[in-house]
């Protein structure tokens, strides 16, 4: 049942992405609306998938890489909807949804078996820490998408090549504000995610911080976004510089989430 729901939601996101991409090419309003409705249906179905998975497992569904990839994808779409409600950027889904689709597609190649939690993970902190961490990263993913759109739009303006894509993208100011809003939501979530992880670590392993590879790279990622937020607030960093640093932060998120797990291992590695 849960795998069927997973595949249905993946299919809805794929159709929604096609709708958004077609909107980029033809600028027909019904294509954008169709993409939004399909995304909404996919999100509801994926939420049901996570609920069913959690009920079957008896705990927060994030105990292995299959579940983590799907929860991250769900978090990304959730962050997308929150920011889309505020900014109404019709083409944003064309960049955000493919990221969620890739994560969900990768998950289909993994073992979907529900395994019992090890004693250290049998804690309420599992849901609190992981939810905060993944939602924080999800808002940074939306910031990345907005940054890419910003650089594309800026390039068109700089080269004075105002093609059809120019009229489908929002202004540079709107894209910059999207990136900033994503940062101001995502950074506190990530911060509290790290703090709750440290508290959980103390209760589970007797140490607030063990310099595990994922802990180390989470801290590196935190510093990148802290530097970006500090630069924006104190020296007025906006535009191109902020967009590029946001993209660097996105790369750090991917390495922390997947690279560390596949290459470095450690206590936080998923099976």
Image (cartoon, rainbow, N blue to C red):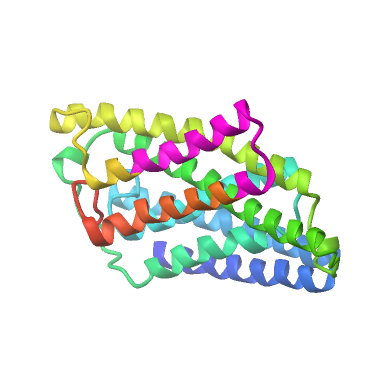
Residue 258 position, x and y percent, is 34, 58
The vertical placement of 45 against 237, above or below, is below
Residue 221 falls inside the magenta stretch: yes
Q: Main secondary structure of the magenta part?
A: helix
Picture quadrant of residue 98: bottom right
What residue span does the magenta drawing correspond to? 218-243
Q: Look at the image and tell me in which quarter the C terminus lies.
A: bottom left
The vertical placement of 88 against 95, above or below, is above
Q: Is residue 71 visible?
A: no
- Name the residue rendered at 68%, 57% in the picture: 151
Q: Look at the image and tell me in which quarter the N terminus lies.
A: bottom left
- Name the residue rendered at 46%, 40% in the picture: 224
Closest to the observer, 168 or 200 = 168
Closest to the observer, 124 or 130 = 130
In the image: residue 41, left or right of residue 54 = right
- Name the residue rendered at 45%, 56% in the picture: 49
Residue 80 falls inside the magenta stretch: no
Q: Is residue 122 visible?
A: yes
- Name the residue rendered at 86%, 65% in the picture: 162
In the image: residue 45, left or right of residue 177 = left
Closest to the observer, 220 or 10 = 220
Residue 116 position, x and y percent, is 19, 51
Residue 77 position, x and y percent, is 57, 52
């Amino acid at each position: 049942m849960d795998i069927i729901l997973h595949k249905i939601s993946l299919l809805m996101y794929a159709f929604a992405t096609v709708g958004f991409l077609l909107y980029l090419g033809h600028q027909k309003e019904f294509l954008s609306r169709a993409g939004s409705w399909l995304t909404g249906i996919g999100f509801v179905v994926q939420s049901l998938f996570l609920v069913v998975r959690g009920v079957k497992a008896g705990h927060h569904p994030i105990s292995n890489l299959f579940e983590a990839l799907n929860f991250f994808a769900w978090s990304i779409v959730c962050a997308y909807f929150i920011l889309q409600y505020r900014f109404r950027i019709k083409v944003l889904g064309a960049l955000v949804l493919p990221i969620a689709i890739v994560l969900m597609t990768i998950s289909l190649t993994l073992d979907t078996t529900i395994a019992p939690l090890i004693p250290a993970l049998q804690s309420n902190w599992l849901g609190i820490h992981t939810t905060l961490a993944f939602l924080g990263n999800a808002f940074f993913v939306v910031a990345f998408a907005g940054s890419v759109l910003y650089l594309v739009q800026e390039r068109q303006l700089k080269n004075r090549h105002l093609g059809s894509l120019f009229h489908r993208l929002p202004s540079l100011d709107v894209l910059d504000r999207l990136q900033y809003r994503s940062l101001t939501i995502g950074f506190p979530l990530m911060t509290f995610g790290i703090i709750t992880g440290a508290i959980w670590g103390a209760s589970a392993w007797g140490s607030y911080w063990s310099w595990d590879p994922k802990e180390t790279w989470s801290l590196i990622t935190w510093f990148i976004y802290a530097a970006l937020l500090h630069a924006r607030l104190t020296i007025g960093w906006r535009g191109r510089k902020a967009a590029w640093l946001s993209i660097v932060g996105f790369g750090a998120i991917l390495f922390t989430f997947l690279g560390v797990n596949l290459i470095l291992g450690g206590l936080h590695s998923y099976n």
